[in-house]
Amino acid sequence: MSESRITQGSIVLAGGGTGGHISPGIAIAERLAEIAPQFDRVFACSTRPVDASMLEHVGADFTPIPAEGLSPRPVKLVRFVRSFVAGRAAARELLAERGTRVVVALGGYVTGPVVAAATAMDVPVLLVNLDATPGKANRWVARRAARVLSACPTPAMPHFAERVVGMPVRDAARARRPREECVRELGLDSGFRTLLVTGASQGATSLNDLLMHLIRSDRGAFGEWQVLHLVGNADRQAIERGYREAGVRARVLPFLHEMGLAWGAADLALSRAGANSVAEAVLNAVPSVFAPYPYHADLHQKWNAKPYHDEGVAVLEDDLVDAAKNRSTLGAALLGLMGDHARRDGMRARLRSMNAQDAAVEIARAAVALAG
């Protein structure tokens, strides 16, 4: 409880492990602060460093909860059970200490022990599904939730959620300044077009490898361009050296909290197709080539971007992992858009004409109604 005010308990946002879980949670927390300041907002996140980094950056109140993913392998299964028991105990302590009125479950393995604790304590749960294919944790949570909303359609499970509300996008991921200011703030050159390359919070090795291949095999395509490359956990210095040796202008960063600057500066993006990344690109009207994460058995990220690909406002290509193989598909699509200014301009105009609803407001209102 704050020293300066008396609250009516807390709303706990449970989820984490990737920026794709934390970013929508931040967006919901921002709207909760506006419409229901009488409730504290607390994150029950994973123990991964990315969670703490993102939440500390926005000054959020958070508690890491021990949890691991479910696996049929005996050793990992034992670890899952142990972490689930420990996580449930830690979640019960958190919910009781903070007078929790409702849990907003954002998906991922952290939600399991938190929702188990909430169910045992008769704390209502609002599930916000963030993927086109609900994962095991979300399917388990849905059976225990008072309400289920989804950020996107779930074609394989069309009746999974009561309503599709859109993806919550945090304020820091919205381009609120003119392009020139964003370019200047990022240390880029206003005289060149900007290609944004991002593999989301963890980075994407195959996209990094593809860019290194393209700047060697198709150097001429980059004459009018500079690259803002978010490389995640990859070797930043090696990638910087690759751009330097190829003579391609580039700003290489591991991660960027203020993604609104990146989207505001971008004329084109090459991005993973996580629901959060797709939503940010569309909201900021940035023409994009989306490459779904290739190691999911069902390639479920593809469904996040497919509606926009079908409408012609984005391009969707499989990631074949190998840079040489990607050159003729994913790389060709990217280079084609880099050289086709009229097509990019048309895509951006159509993206701007789309009505963007603030999903975070609807989700925040649903949480407040359950809390009340």
Image (cartoon, rainbow, N blue to C red):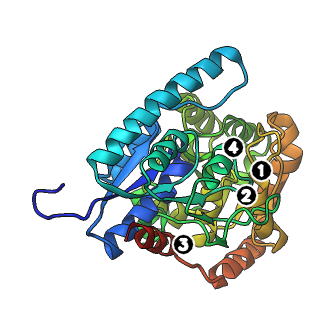
Specify which label sits upstream in the sequence, 3 or 2: 2
Q: Are marks 2 and 1 in contact (CB under 8 Å)?
A: yes
Q: Are marks 3 and 2 in contact (CB under 8 Å)?
A: no
Determine crowd level at label 2: few under 14, some 14-19, many 20+ residues with C-alpha closer than 10 A: many
Residue type highlighted by circle 4: Lys
Pair 4/1: label in front: 4
Specify which label sits upstream in the sequence, 1 or 3: 1
Q: Position of residue 345 (x, y in %)?
A: 70, 76
Residue type highlighted by circle 1: His
Residue type highlighted by circle 2: Ala
Judging depth in this view, the residue of 243 and 50 nearest the camera is 50
**Which residue appears at 39% of the width and 59% of the height?**
185
Q: Quadrant of residue 208?
A: top right
**Which residue appears at 75% of the width and 49% of the height?**
292
In the rendered image, the quadrant that contains the C terminus is: bottom left
In the rendered image, the quadrant that contains the N terminus is: bottom left
Residue that numbered label 1 is attached to: 300
Residue type highlighted by circle 3: Ala
Q: Quadrant of residue 243?
A: top right
Q: Is residue 228 above or below residue 237?
A: below
